[in-house]
Amino acid sequence: MAVMVLAAVGPALLFLWLVLRQDRFPEPAAPVLTTFVLGFAIIPVVILLAWPLDTWAARVNDPVWTPVMEAFLTAAVPEEVLKFAVLTLYCLRHRHFNEPMDAIVYGVTASLGFAALENVLYVTQAGDDWTATAIARALTAVPGHGALGAVMGLLLAKARFGPPERRWPLAWALVVPILLHGLYDAPLLWAERVRAAGGELTDNQGLMMGAAVFAVLFVEVAWAWRALRRLRAGQQDWIEAAHRAAPVFEDWATEKRDRDR
């Protein structure tokens, strides 16, 4: 059991470490750890919210629309809404959330906290196939969750720190991850529904399903990586510009510079 849990949690911790390394002015350990634990802790709430929605979606009993509704209503909406709640109700109000890069760091942290416990549930319930499940999810679901957290963080940064005349609506930080998450899950749930009904995917159906899933995953990861690199490259310039515009930034800007040294 210990090996299974390590195999489930390890990928989330690895991806989190890789992202934290990109931050030129690292966040204190306490809020990062708290955010990770909050992402971990929202899973029971997700399950409670998803249960009635899943029951309602199943009543549609349509081979196409039911998996689409399940993807959005029972997975994408409750999961992304609660991750968004962690970011806006805790992280955004924290005094250390004070530059655009922080939005990505905390967004990824909350998402990977969620992914860690979700992975434990999947891997420990996979029986003899737990190794294949752990590997498959380490290469798909875990980076997908992390990437969605980065996208949410990027859009939150545009809403929080963008110039007033170009500031994005905060709602985009929730809507876009929901859309990407639902588009990723829908083909998988459709294939799962076909197999549950005793059918098998044809070769063409399997290829189309796989292509759709990996296309969405590629968009998520590429967008997240580009955002991470761009915000990292502009960290020092943003801090210096913020200090010039408002000397009140002096304390935390100095603190970040000292921590970087």
Image: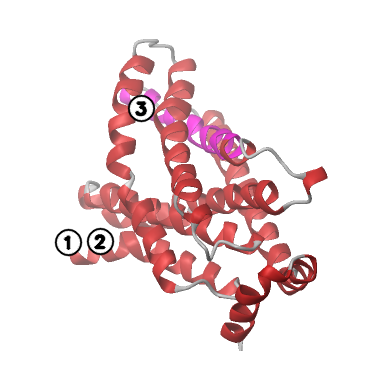
Q: Report helix, strand or loop for mark 2.
A: helix
- x, y (%) of residue 41? 31, 50
**Residue kind at label 3, given as amino acid type:** Arg
Front disc: 1 or 3: 1
In the displayed structure, 225 sits above or below 198; it is below
Give the SS element for disc 1: loop
Instruction: Look at the image and give the residue range highlighted in magenta.
Output: 175-198
Crowding at label 3, few (<14), some or many (≥20) Cα neighbours within 10 Å? few
Seen from this angle, which residue lies furthest right?
165
Q: Is residue 198 visible?
A: no
Q: Viewed as shown, does residue 195 lie left or right of 102?
A: left
- Amino acid type at mark 1: Met
Give the SS element for disc 3: helix
Q: Position of residue 109 (x, y in %)?
A: 46, 59
Q: Which residue is mark 1?
A: 1
Which mark, residue 5? Answer: 2
Circle 1 packing at 10 Å, graded few (<14), some (14-19), many (20+), is few
The circle drawn on residue 195 is: 3
The amino acid sitting under disc 2 is Val
Placement of 171 over or under 107, stated as above or below: above
Label 1 and label 2: CA atoms lie apart by 6 Å
